[in-house]
């Protein structure tokens, strides 16, 4: 079975691995057809992904075909096309028992904490498979990154009367805008990169954009909301300076959701926090319900991600192209690999 292993930072290796096809009653054997490449993969390649060890088979954004199922599996069948929910819990701990499967104490993310989908086939617990009779493997592979944005918007309980600011217009920021606008909220995107803001304006239903890091940024933000400030700020940057600014941007009694992860200590100006009586949240991964919501919306034609997939590669050619995707001039939004 052809497999791609990240042996150490900066070094991929194609190899042949064996496959154990015997299944437990709750498991499924799947064939991988499409793999989305994301920031986590880039960070692992660069040696700066937290909670990561080498060697590792990457790949957690997957469109797969079910080849075989265990005797207890009823919700998917041989031949089904599926997206994979990669957040696998090893124990039924407190978070899992309460339904927070996205942040279990012993969570193991496919392609991060355990080997992922950059291989022809693998076995996984079937409960993490979400099928669709309409969507393509490519569409199914992008359900997971869409899920990050979907979960953040659901965490914030965005309503039509909300004014929403999404900070960061990379893939996760774009995903977040989809669900904020789908909730009916007036939504504005902020970023330092004007070309990304242009892309966001062209490919989503946002109401406007604001360039970050300028002296008049706050004034421009107020202009977008007719003098008001956003009632919900969703920060997808993982940048501590941007995250601190979110308290300045948020309206009194507003909500702030940190989607991006900053690897370090974060501090903020407490008077902003208390004076405005803000609500501060983190958003991690996604829930099974988010996957189901996205699949339904995509099947109904409410989400179109064709323009988001800016780069494609075969499995055999991916290693040669991977480093070019790391360069800003490549302008990668989402790369998808075909097997």
Image: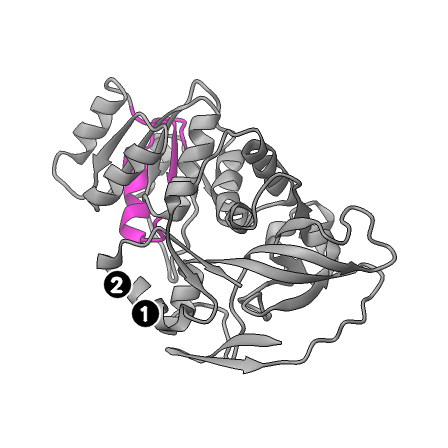
Q: Is residue 251 magenta?
A: yes
Q: CA distance from mark 2 to mark 1?
A: 7 Å
* Labels 2 and 1 touching (C-beta < 8 A): yes
Q: Which mark is residue 327?
A: 2
User: Which segment did they paint magenta?
Assistant: 229-257
Q: Nearer the viewer, residue 36 or 155?
A: 36
Q: Which residue is mark 1?
A: 323
The image quadrant that residue 261 belongs to is bottom left
74 sits left or right of 175 in the view: right
> Which corner quadrant of the image does residue 325 belong to?
bottom left
Which residue is nearer to you in this view: 187 or 261?
187
Query: What SS does tag 1 mark?
Result: helix
Residue 213 position within the rendered picture, expressed as x and y whole percent measured from the top left: 18, 44
Residue 258 placement (x, y as % from top left): 42, 45
Residue at x-position 36% and y-position 53%: 238
Q: Position of residue 147 (x, y in %)?
A: 53, 44
Task: Using residue 226 as the reference point, say whether residue 335 is left or right of it.
Answer: right
């Amino acid at each position: 079975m052809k497999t791609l292993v990240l042996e150490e930072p900066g070094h991929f290796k194609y190899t042949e691995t064996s496959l154990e096809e015997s299944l437990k009653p709750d498991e499924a054997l799947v064939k991988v057809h499409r793999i989305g490449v994301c920031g986590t993969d880039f960070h692992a390649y660069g040696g700066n992904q937290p909670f990561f060890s080498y060697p590792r088979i990457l790949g957690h954004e997957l469109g797969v075909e079910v080849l075989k199922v265990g005797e207890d599996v009823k919700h998917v069948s041989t031949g089904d096309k599926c997206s994979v929910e990669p957040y696998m819990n090893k124990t039924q701990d407190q978070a899992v028992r309460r339904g927070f499967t996205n942040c279990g104490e012993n969570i193991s993310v496919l392609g991060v904490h355990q080997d992922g989908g950059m291989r022809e086939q693998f076995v996984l617990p079937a409960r993490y498979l979400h099928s669709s009779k309409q969507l393509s493997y490519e569409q199914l592979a992008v359900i997971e990154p869409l899920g990050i944005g979907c979960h953040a918007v659901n965490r914030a309980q965005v309503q039509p009367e909300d004014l929403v600011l999404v900070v960061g217009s990379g893939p996760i920021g774009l995903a977040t805008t989809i669900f904020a606008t789908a909730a009916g909220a007036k939504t504005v995107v902020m970023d330092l990169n004007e070309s990304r803001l242009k892309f966001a304006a062209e490919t989503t239903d946002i109401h406007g954009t604001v360039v970050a890091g300028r002296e008049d940024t706050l004034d421009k933000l107020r202009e977008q909301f007719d003098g008001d400030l956003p009632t919900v700020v969703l920060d997808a940057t993982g940048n501590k300076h941007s995250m601190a600014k979110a308290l300045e941007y948020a309206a009194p009694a507003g909500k702030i959701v940190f989607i991006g992860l900053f690897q370090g200590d974060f501090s903020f100006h407490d008077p902003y926090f208390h004076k405005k009586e803000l609500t501060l949240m983190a958003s991690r991964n996604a829930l099974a319900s988010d996957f189901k919501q996205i699949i339904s919306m995509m099947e109904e034609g409410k989400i179109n991600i064709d323009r988001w997939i800016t780069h494609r590669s075969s499995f055999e050619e991916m290693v040669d192209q991977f480093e070019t995707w790391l360069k800003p001039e490549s302008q990668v939004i989402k790369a998808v690999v075909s097997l």
